[in-house]
Image: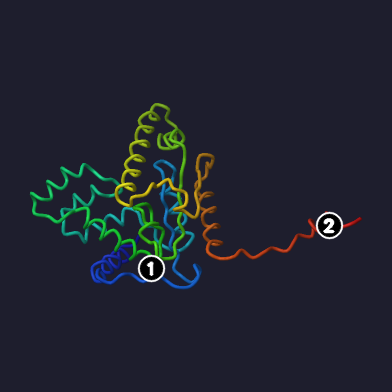
Amino acid sequence: MARDEFQALLTYVRTDQLQPHRPHSGPLESSPPVVTIARDHGTGGEVIAARLAESLGVSCFDKEILDAVVATATSDPALMRQLDEKLPGRAGMFLYASLMGLHDPLTEYQKLLTRVVNGIAFRGGVIVGRGAHLLLRGAPRFRVRIVGSDEICAARLAGGDPAKVADALHEVQRVNAARAKYFKEFFKVSNEDPLQYDLIVNTDRFADLDAVAEVVLHAYRVHGGPVKAQPPSSTHQDSTSGP
């Protein structure tokens, strides 16, 4: 994402903090593209999101979301980073905040995250993680979840090195468990609930992640409106005609 676009996002968060963002009206095609990507660790979700954003002509927001939260926070930036898609031991965190004379970091993180995500949606973008599909309840958005088995995700992270698979498997399970806890405590829902999403893609049998991005792009284009019925092909007509 270009620096000027990041600065524009910060300006939105800082100047429009007290005004609830009004969702776009009209069909999906008349609004800026907004796609949220929830993903299991090691599924290639970040790569897919970047490819999709490029195809849609919008920016992809991942680490930039946290940067915007940190840049506008009054609490210790380190606390904001600790809260990014995971919930650390709250007792120690709040004790530290109290000793430093800081506000409740979780409450501030929730408010800032909501503002940042809505600021992105106002201009359009592909948003990775952070429960964005739940934060944009009233706005048009296409909600995607990328999943995969622990073993295949670990093999992907290991880059084909068998010696690294065991450590990668532990990493996959640790990160996914942290994200599940984040959803449970932050949003009071399970991130595995399929009804939260418009499309779920399992990347286990996709060697080419660009192909997954194409699948998501096609689904986005037909989402939110009726698909025009195609006339039967001449081949089909010929095969069914005759006595």
Question: Residue 82, image x and y in percent?
Answer: 23, 47
- The reply, left or right, for residue 15 in relation to residue 170 is left
Q: Secondary structure at mark 1?
A: helix
Residue depicted at x 34% and y 35%: 171
Residue behind mark 2:
238
- In the picture shown, does residue 120 fall above or below 180? below
The residue beneath circle 1 is: 123
Q: Quadrant of residue 61?
A: bottom left
At label 1, the amino acid type is Arg
Task: Classify residue 110 as left or right of residue 150.
Answer: left
Task: Say which quarter of the image contains residue 122.
Answer: bottom left
Q: CA distance from mark 1 to mark 2?
A: 49 Å
Closer to the N terminus: mark 1 or mark 2? 1
* Residue in the picture at 56% in, 66% down: 225
In front: 120, or 182?
Answer: 182
Question: Which residue occupies the extreme right position in the image?
Answer: 243
- Where residue 176 appears, as percent x and y from the top left, is 36, 40
Residue 86 at x, y = what percent? Answer: 28, 46
- Where disc 2 sits, the SS reads helix
How is the structure coloured here?
rainbow
Q: Pick the quarter of the image with the C terminus.
A: bottom right
Residue at image location 47% in from the left, 40% down from the top: 148
Q: Which mark is residue 81?
A: none
Q: Residue furthest front?
A: 188
As drawn, 25 above or below 115:
below
Report how many numbered discs are placed on residues in the image: 2
> Alpha-carbon neighbours of circle 2 within 10 Å: few (<14), some, or many (≥20)?
few
> In terms of depth relative to the viewer, which is nearer, 97 or 205?
97
Q: Quadrant of residue 22?
A: bottom left
Q: Amino acid at mark 2?
A: Asp
